[in-house]
Image: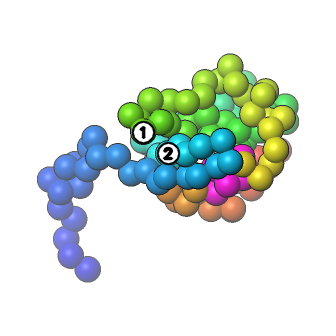
Amino acid sequence: MPAFNKKKFLAKLGVKHRKLVSLPDGDLYIKALTAMEQEEFETAMLDEKGKAKTDVSLKAIMVIMSAEDENGEKIFTMDDLQTLGEMPAADINKMFSVAQKLNNISDEDIDELTKN
């Protein structure tokens, strides 16, 4: 295994890792979250006691944080959370599945985050 190259690692800063997702209503991109955005995602899932919130959709929050248009602008905000949680599961699942892969989030990570 080659030695760690700090310069090469830090050169990734600003490089967008995203994937085009086609939905019946049009195309959008799902991006890989930054380390800070991933922490925001985890924080959004927990209440003040550090327990998983039961009144929010983990998948909808991930979609809000990772969906963007062709120009890299966010499509959704946290104001859309309830509406997204009420959307057909197929579209939300498709976007979440891509986000899960891009962000290297395993099913075990989700179980750990959501267990009370």
Q: Where 65 falls versus 9 (above or below)?
A: above
Q: Residue at x 61, y 34 (%)?
A: 64
Report the residue at 39% width, 51% height from top. 17
Find the distance from the CA under tag 1 to the CA under tag 2: 7 Å
Residue at the outermost left position: 7
In reply to whether residue 96 is colored magenta, the answer given is: yes
Q: Which residue is mark 1?
A: 70
Residue 14: x, y in percent?
28, 41
Dominant secondary-structure state across the stretch colored magenta = helix
For label 1, the crowd category at 10 Å Cα-Cα, with few meaning under 14, some 14 to 19 and many 20 or more, is few
First in sequence, mark 1 or 2: give its number.
2
Identify the residue at image location x=14%, y=53%. 7
Q: Secondary structure at mark 1?
A: loop
Name the residue rendered at 19%, 49% in the picture.
11
The residue labelled by disc 2 is 29
Locate the C terminus and report the quarter of the image it occupies.
top right
Q: Nearer the viewer, residue 6 or 90?
A: 90
Q: Which residues are magenta?
A: 92-97
Q: Quadrant of the N terminus?
A: bottom left
Q: Does dot 2 land on a helix, a strand or a loop? A: strand
